[in-house]
Image (cartoon, rainbow, N blue to C red):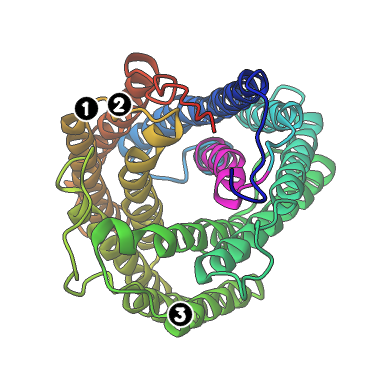
Amino acid sequence: METGQTIWPAESQPTAAATRVETMRMAQAREAALSRLFMAYISTGLVFMLLPGTFLGVWNLLQISGRESVALVSPAWLQAHGHAQVFGWIGSFIFGIGFYSIPKFRGTMKPALGTAWVCWAMWTIGVAARWMANIYLVQWRLLLPLSAALELTAFLIFFRMVSQHQPETSGKGRLEPWVWVVISASVGLMLTLIANLAACIYLALRNESPALSHILDQRYLTLMTWGFLVPFVWGFSTKWMSLFLGLKPVRPRLLFSALAVNFAGVALTLMGWGAQATVFFVVGTILIIAALRMFEPARQEAKTRGVHPSFPFFVRMAYGWLLVAALLGVGAALWDSSGGIWGASRHALTVGFIAVMVLCVGQRILPAFASMRLLWSIRLMFIGLLLLTLGCALRVSSEALAYQDYANWAWSVLPVSAFLELAGITAFAMNIFGTFILEPSHAQKQPLVVRIK
């Protein structure tokens, strides 16, 4: 026997093996619990996306097209559609991905799941209450501030929980660039929710309807889109697109320059210089495209396993829509007289860029987060993206023509665009629900392997 070697009794080995088995079972239980929480957030987001969000948006557009005027449609209904899409859909997705992925990426202990479920309930009730207040006017002076307070409180709970997770190795230097971008987007979301609460209190005390005035709504929408949604997509693009598309490494200086220019544009808009801010958004968009190397030749083949091979094409097209949205913003500041060019710019941003990116990246990562599932149908992924893109192209082009009275026939194109987008969004929802319900969880099939030393 070698000097220093320790001989453990044979009867202690089963005890060690049993401990390892129990540890692995606890890890699997933790994974299953996180996946259930994750799927609850994503499913809630899909419901808000389909019914209060997209369906109401289609109904609003049918009314606008039939009356050939946006002024004859209730502003409260238009704002209810936008709130459900941004907070009900995108917000729920962000919360679900955050609660699930941050403990995994940081290698920490499991989060307080009970608190995460409370956060889900508060966020869902808050968004639903806003819908009830705007659409049915049921006790709207009470529901508006209550819904905004619930949403802000849920975000603060979420932010506190995810910010508590620290890297395992504190020896790491600075945070990665994508983390800073996501942090800035989180600040934008917090400011948006604070502005929303202030606006809701003002409306409840002073206004005759639960709808913001046009000027305040324009500034609020800029804060919400360019201050919150756009930086979030930039952050996750920085994290994943080099890997997914095989692009060269991100240029950090250009990335941070794009972020600074973009937030300068948001600040100018809030100070009342919206026309001048549109130039900043164009410059910021050009900088982010260059930073991500989005249209440069890839250094290696894109990773499209499990998704449709058109995935890289639609991601790049989304960034093309972002540039179109920014340029249309400049055109709107110069020539818009009826809201048509502004509307086309906003639609190119929210649907062409944000929604297309969510459909692309969502169907790439959501199945893996849901206990290592595979996407239900890659063909349905392509169909949804194609329909959404066609609908967006028709909407952006016809909205400017119709609202500005450049072409009367364009009013009849608007409903077609709405139904195409609804079909595309529905295909996405079907694919994710099909993945959650019909696809087996491969995480649960992993065998328990225990080494006895």
Above or below: residue 377 compared with residue 183: above
The magenta stretch spans residue 30: no
- Disc 3 is placed on an element classified as helix
Q: Residue furthest front?
A: 1
Q: Quadrant of residue 122?
A: top right
Percent x, y for residue 239? Answer: 43, 61
State the CA–CA distance, disc 3 to disc 1.
36 Å
Query: Between tags 3 and 2, which lies in front?
Result: 3
Does the segment drawn in magenta span residue 103?
Answer: yes
In the image, residue 267 lies at what x, y percent?
63, 75
Marks 2/1 in contact by CB < 8 Å: the verdict is: yes
- Stretch of the chain drawn in magenta: 88-108
The kind of residue tagged 2 is Asn
Q: Which residue is mark 3?
A: 252
Q: Say which residue label 2 marks.
A: 431
The CA distance from mark 3 to mark 2 is 35 Å
Q: Which is more N-terminal, label 1 or label 2?
A: 1
Q: Amino acid at mark 1?
A: Ser
Specify whether residue 62 is in view: yes
